[in-house]
Image (cartoon, helix red, strand yellow):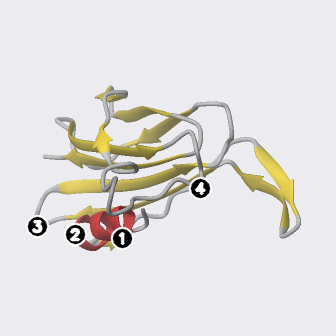
Amino acid sequence: TIYYPYYFASRFGRGTALNLSVDCPGYDSEHGDNVPYLDVSGVADEKGKTLTFFAVNRHPDKSLTLDLSLLGFGDKARIADHQVMTHKDLRATNTLADQTNVVPRKGSKSSVADGRLKADLPPHSWQMIRVAVS
């Protein structure tokens, strides 16, 4: 199942890395305290006039709202693509018999308005959101 995040990162994760800060609830683990439930990275592709964001919601049963400022990237931004990967079983895999058990699906809970990208991130999910900018 890791194929798809690597594929999308390789294909669309090119450009200038964006410096993003995350403010969200966290959890304690054996490896660290207050680990954020949300992890997000992004790149700006000036040639393709797109921003691409990769987000992970680690929360086991709560959706998180992604709210990003697009200040400085034009006022005509729009969602170009939104892909979501999630599965109720975190140990689920793709097999020869079921090659589409865990695959990206078209996301529908993202929007751009008033210079902000907003998206609803389901529990235990990986997302890629591409925004076309002017």
Tell me the residue at 24%/65% (across/down). 12
Residue 61, x across and y down, in percent: 67, 33
Residues 96 and 55: in front is 96
- Classify residue 80 by image quadrant: top left
Q: How many angstroms separate mark 1 from mark 2 (CA)?
A: 8 Å
Residue with the mark numbered 2? 11
Q: Distance between the residues labelled 2 and 4?
A: 26 Å
Give the number of the disc on residue 47.
Answer: 3
**Residue 1's spot in the image, x, y percent?**
42, 62
The residue tagged 4 is 91
Q: In this view, does 66 lie above or below 128?
A: above
Mark 2 crowdedness (10 Å alpha carbons): few <14, some 14-19, many ≥20: few
Q: Which amino acid does label 4 sit on?
A: Arg
Q: Find numbered disc 2 in the image and state the secondary structure of the residue it sits on.
A: helix
Residue type at tag 3: Lys
Element on which disc 3 rests: loop
x, y (%) of residue 17? 38, 70
Label 3 to label 4, Cα distance in Å?
38 Å
What is the C-alpha distance between the residues marked 1 and 3? 22 Å
